[in-house]
Amino acid sequence: MLKIGIAGIGFMGMIHYLAWQRVPGSKVVALSSRDPKKRAGDWRGIQGNFGPPGKRMHLRGVRAFETFDELVAQSDIDLVDICLPNSGHCKAALAAADARKHVLCEKPIALNVTDAKRMVASASKAGMQLMIGHILPFFPEYCFALSALWSGKYGKVRGGHFKRVISDRPPAANYFDAAEIGGPLIDLHIHDAHFIRLLFGMPTAVFSRGRTRGDVVEFAETQFVFEDTSQMVSATCGVIPQHGRSFTHGFEIHFDRATLLFDFAMLGGKPHVATPLTVLDAKGKATQPKLGSGDPVDAFVAELREVACSIKSGRPSNILSGQLASDALQICLRENQSVKSGRLVKI
């Protein structure tokens, strides 16, 4: 039985708690939260942009602690699931590794590359696995694209465009604080940076143009440069005043023998799929593969199954690795640098 302790019960902590219930051979045995109501199981104040709203939870058999230190000291915990604010990821992950616990940490891995490297090195030295919760490859449309790459079904991947934009109603007051959340590139675009890294490898440089808010980028367009100059990859990301469209993401990915299309948005508070996952093949056909249920929580279940399998098998995940997450962070920081300098920045 894989025993889990969840650090932080906000929206993501709640989603992880619900998803772990559906992972065979795994059990949440402890959690930590500074909020006494949450420790008592009153999660009614939790609300996110997808999934179920918070409710009263029956936490029978789950030990609840006020501090992370109390949680990580529990000898029976195998995995610490870190769902703390971005600025707390590094300190918590280092403490968990010191306590010889495996770690699943929500993205981003950290707010700077130095901390990310410390996290990777600390876990390696302790003989523990460090996995970063980059959920995007587990959503069915993105999972399909990644599987197409790995199988070679449509030949070599040649390039694509990715987008991820939210309305100017950020989820936290300190969203644009570089030392707390990191802004849209670090908290939002990093999903696509990680996925681009998975599909195309590590870029050699980036060229980004955009707008800044304080020390962070508010909105940007990026061209990624690769050693293979035939790979043409770009991305759009950020925050704009589009309150009627609170969120949108999608992609167009080009393979030798097919193009994959996907476009989703929240319009007026309701989900709208402008383009379901569509495969345009070389014969002129446009087909829409059958995917999963479409319930976002299912993606988290798949992600946590990957985590459990990685720990139980001793074979680290090739999707959730700390090094890949560190690479994604480095890409985003270079994009930020490119926007500010107006120049191409090498990685």
Image: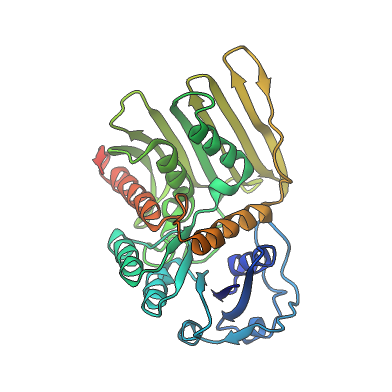
Q: In this view of the protein, can residue 268 be seen by the observer?
A: no
Residue 213: percent from left, percent from top: 40, 54
State whether residue 102 is above or below residue 307: below
Q: Residue furthest front?
A: 313
Quadrant in which the C terminus is drawn: top left
Residue 125: percent from left, percent from top: 30, 69
Q: Image check: 169 left or right of 339? A: right
Quadrant in which the N terminus is drawn: bottom right
Q: Nearer the viewer, residue 220 or 92?
A: 92
Residue 331: percent from left, percent from top: 34, 47
Q: Nearer the viewer, residue 266 or 119?
A: 119
Image quarter for residue 14?
A: bottom right
- Please tell me which residue is depicted at 57% across the width and 40% down the height of the picture: 142
Q: Nearer the viewer, residue 240 or 64?
A: 64
State whether residue 286 is above or below residue 107: above
- Please tell me which residue is depicted at 66% across the width and 16% down the height of the picture: 285
Q: Image check: 265 left or right of 173? A: right
State whether residue 204 is above or below residue 328: above
Q: In this view of the protein, can residue 336 be seen by the observer?
A: yes
Residue 326: percent from left, percent from top: 35, 55
- Please tell me which residue is depicted at 30% across the width and 61% down the height of the picture: 117
Looking at the rendered structure, the number of numbered marks drawn on it comes to 0
State whether residue 238 is above or below residue 273: below
